[in-house]
Image (cartoon, rainbow, N blue to C red):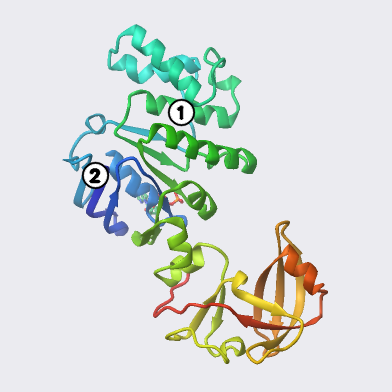
């Protein structure tokens, strides 16, 4: 058993930050809490950690009711965005800190510190001080320190948020590999959908204190439960269902808005029975694919993503006449903007 959150709510003054959240995080899994700023991700994480007390609901950690347990009793490892290493202690001393507080035998601490240094790939840097490390290295020390006390659950609040894009990307892959080695139940807060998709087993999408959807990355991307999820995870064209592009197609129940992924816009040079005319406005090279900004003859703008191969085959130019049709589109009963 990992973490179970039951009907959990938290209010700050008049503001409801977390609204009756229910959640089950399987033991040994890596789960991302994903949502825009202010959606309640950090508050939910802090409630699980015991840094906040819930107004209602329960938290179960590895089968035990932890709702009113102290932070220490919960045996949780926590890593924040802004690494809080002890500046006056070396890397080794930082990692050993929790074990020393618990009065673990010296020989055991020494061995475990070496093991953890290896695990976070910082062997040889154990005698440095935090100021002598890069941001990415410091976050790896913070992770080693959190893991040192063998926590039941590891909670990470945007641990790579303060780092530059390249380091961040490397650390994501590294965290995934690390998790595959240690298998500690991990809850990871991020507002970056690519980060969540890349590293997690399951994603919990949050919006305005609510859980919108829980699922594996592909499930959330391919079968979004709500308009919010569809527009938050990946790019999307939001078009009126009366738009010409849908006239010759039917995608189930059509509400007032249709959601069309750019990769589901098929672009051709010649008309077909199911396509409508459009014109190329702008072409943006994204490296692995080309973003074609098009406008339909009714003035509606539509973005299409084309593979390099398809783009070369079409040989597109700005202002060129093309014909488009939707491969797939979705519609939801209610859409509220993010
Ligand atoms: N201690 C507090 N007192 C008052 N309001 C708070 C407190 N902590 C959080 N909030 C409010 O609760 C809401 C949710 O905050 P939270 O930090 O959980 O969001 P988040 O999804 O983690 O956002 P971010 O990605 O910006 O950190 C925000 O509107 C925030 O201002």
Q: Residues within 10 Å of mark 2 (few under 14, many from 20)?
A: some
Q: Residue at x 28, y 12 (%)?
A: 103
Q: Nearer the viewer, residue 219 or 109?
A: 219
- Left or right of 296, for residue 35: left
Q: Secondary structure at mark 2?
A: loop
| Residue indicated by mark 2 | 53
Relative to 81, does residue 271 appear above or below in the rendering?
A: below
Q: Hey, which quadrant is residue 133 in on the image?
A: top right
Relative to 9, does residue 90 appear above or below in the rendering?
A: above
Can you give x and y, in whole percent of width and height, for residue 40 in the image? 37, 54
Q: Is residue 338 at all visible to an observer of this figure?
A: no
Can you give x and y, in whole percent of width and height, for residue 324 in the image? 67, 82
Q: Which mark is residue 252?
A: none
Q: Residues within 10 Å of mark 1 (few under 14, many from 20)?
A: many
Can you give x and y, in whole percent of width and height, for residue 222 in the image? 47, 66
Q: Residue at x 61, y 37 (%)?
A: 167
Q: Locate the N terminus by quadrant.
A: top left
Can you give x and y, in whole percent of width and height, for residue 308 in the image? 74, 63
Q: Nearer the viewer, residue 246 or 16?
A: 246
């Amino acid at each position: 058993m990992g973490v179970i959150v039951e009907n959990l709510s938290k209010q700050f003054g008049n503001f409801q930050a977390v609204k009756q959240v229910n959640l089950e995080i399987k033991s040994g899994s890596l789960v991302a809490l994903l949502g825009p700023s202010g959606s309640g991700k950090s508050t939910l994480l802090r409630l699980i950690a015991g840094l906040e007390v819930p107004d209602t609901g329960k938290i179960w950690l590895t089968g035990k009711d932890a709702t009113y347990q102290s932070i220490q009793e919960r045996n949780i490892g926590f890593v924040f965005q802004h690494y809080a290493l002890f500046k006056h202690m070396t890397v080794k001393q930082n990692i050993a800190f929790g074990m020393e507080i618990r009065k673990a035998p010296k020989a055991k601490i020494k061995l475990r510190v070496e093991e953890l240094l290896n695990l976070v790939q910082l062997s040889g840097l154990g005698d440095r001080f935090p100021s002598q490390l890069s941001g990415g290295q410091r976050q790896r020390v913070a992770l080693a320190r959190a893991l040192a006390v063998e926590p039941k659950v590891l909670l990470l609040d945007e641990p790579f948020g303060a780092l530059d894009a390249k380091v961040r990307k490397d650390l994501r892959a590294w965290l995934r590999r690390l998790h595959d080695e240690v298998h500690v139940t991990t809850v990871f807060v991020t507002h970056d959908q690519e980060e969540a998709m890349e590293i997690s087993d399951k994603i919990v999408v949050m919006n305005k204190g609510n859980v919108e959807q829980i699922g594996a990355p592909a499930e959330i991307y391919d079968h979004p439960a709500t308009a919010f999820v569809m527009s938050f995870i990946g790019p999307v064209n939001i078009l009126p269902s009366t738009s010409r592009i849908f006239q010759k197609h039917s995608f189930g129940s059509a509400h007032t808005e249709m959601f069309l992924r750019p990769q589901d816009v098929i672009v051709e040079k010649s008309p077909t029975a199911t396509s409508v005319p459009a014109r190329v406005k702008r072409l943006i090279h994204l490296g692995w694919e080309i973003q074609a900004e098009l406008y339909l003859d009714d003035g509606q703008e539509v973005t299409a993503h084309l593979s390099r191969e398809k783009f070369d085959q079409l040989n597109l130019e700005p202002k060129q006449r093309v014909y488009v049709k939707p491969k797939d589109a979705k519609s939801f009963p209610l859409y509220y903007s993010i």
